[in-house]
Amino acid sequence: MHKSRSIKQNDHPDALPNFRNLGVTLRILLISNCLALLQAILMASAWNDVPQRMMEIVTLLTPILLSSLLVLWAAQPWLSRLTYHHGALAVAALVLVLTLSIHYIGSGLYQQMGSGYRYFDAMRYGLISVIESGILLLYFRLRSRTLSRALHDARLQALRARIRPHFLFNSINAVLGIVRTQPKQAEAVLEDMADLFRMAMTEGDDLVPLRQEIQLCKQYLALEQLRLGDRLRTDWQVQEVPDDALIPPLLLQPLLENAVYHGIEPLPQGGCVDIILRCSGDELHLKVKNPCALRIDELHPGNRIALRNIRERLDLLFDVEARYKAERGKDYYCVEIVMPYVKEKST
């Protein structure tokens, strides 16, 4: 059983980057080549000497970089079980061993480009590889700490949304209106409200089962439907979603909240919110579409923060492997999220 904690205590722990993530691989390649270019400029005696120096560096860098990415990809399950500092040392050690091994195998070629002192060159290249590994790990650590604030902000924003007077007072008034005539329904509504508060205030994991998020959203929509009545209709299309799919917590609910407050509520006749969830290969698709007035004002700043927060969390967890798209038509608004299909671990 999870112990409830204040959302202020939800600090995202340091963790190594996921070396099986495409975005991480691309960033490593880009940063490594930028560092190589900087090294070539520092070593060159003139600008026309930079290309020659760059070619010499790339000759050694390329096999080391590709082999390191391959080894780290294979070692990812093992690295993920280590603490951050132990994992960082393991990464540096792996890269150092690969650097020395490749330098030894290609000693004939690299000795011509080096100082002529084999052991000095090996020590120099090994030191450079460790320094570059440290720079890359520091970059990913700082990036993770910066973006991980979105995880804290998401729960804080969700809690504020739950205790917003407009939402809270209307829900309480709706319960008071049916407590005498429909006591069982009133009890169910209060339980739904308690679940929403509990979800916002308890510490969550980076990923939760999609079925849990769907249940939370249905509880939220039931509260809003008690207030809006027949004006709020929903169409859930979740037949193509596997039961073991995982998504970031509080990802779908803010999209539904925007659909209700900025789409359904301003329309006198109301409308239907379409929630389409499906799995296509290794990707999970989440789509929320709602009708809206022909002319609508800009979203409330709080809702812009919520939508931006979703994008930041997707960047943190999936990098370039996740996509976020918002489309505003003449009389509708649609948000679609595509992310990797992550399976729940069997126990």
Image (spheres, rainbow, N blue to C red):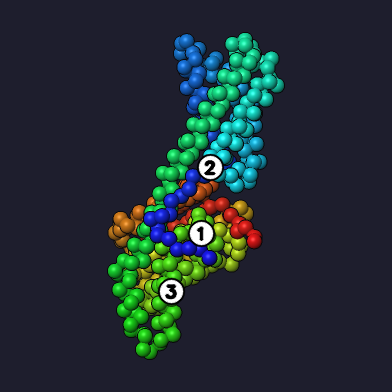
The three-letter amino acid code for the residue at tag 3 is: Asp
Q: Residue 59's quadrant in the figure?
A: top right
Q: Nearer the viewer, mark 3 or mark 2?
A: 2
Tell me if residue 191 can be seen.
yes
Residue at 48%, 39% (x, y): give it: 140
Q: Residue furthest right?
A: 105
Residue at 61%, 52% (x, y): give it: 282
Tag 3: Cα neighbours inside 10 Å, few (<14), some, or many (≥20)?
A: many
Residue that badge 3 annotates: 192
- Is 49 or 89 nearer to us in this picture? 89
- Is 237 or 197 nearer to us in this picture? 197
Residue that badge 2 annotates: 84
The reply to whether callout 3 and callout 2 are in contact (CB within 8 Å) is no
> Of helix, strand and loop, which one carries label 2?
helix
- How far across and down, in percent of the image, does residue 132 sit? 52, 28
- Is 90 or 153 nearer to us in this picture? 90
Q: Nearer the viewer, mark 1 or mark 2?
A: 2
Residue 45 is left or right of residue 68, and the answer is left
The three-letter amino acid code for the residue at tag 2 is: Tyr
Query: Which numbered disc, 1 or 3, marks the residue that appears first in the sequence?
Result: 3
Query: Which numbered disc, 3 or 2, marks the residue that appears first in the sequence?
Result: 2
The three-letter amino acid code for the residue at tag 1 is: Leu
Residue 75 is left or right of residue 246, and the answer is right
- How far across and down, in percent of the image, does residue 133 sit? 54, 31
Residue that badge 1 annotates: 286
Q: CA distance from mark 3 to mark 2?
A: 39 Å
> Of helix, strand and loop, which one carries label 1?
strand
- How far across and down, in percent of the image, does residue 245 sit? 58, 60
- Residue 28: image tag: none
Relative to residue 169, is residue 119 depicted above or below? above
Q: CA distance from mark 1 to mark 2?
A: 32 Å
Residue at 62%, 33% (x, y): give it: 94
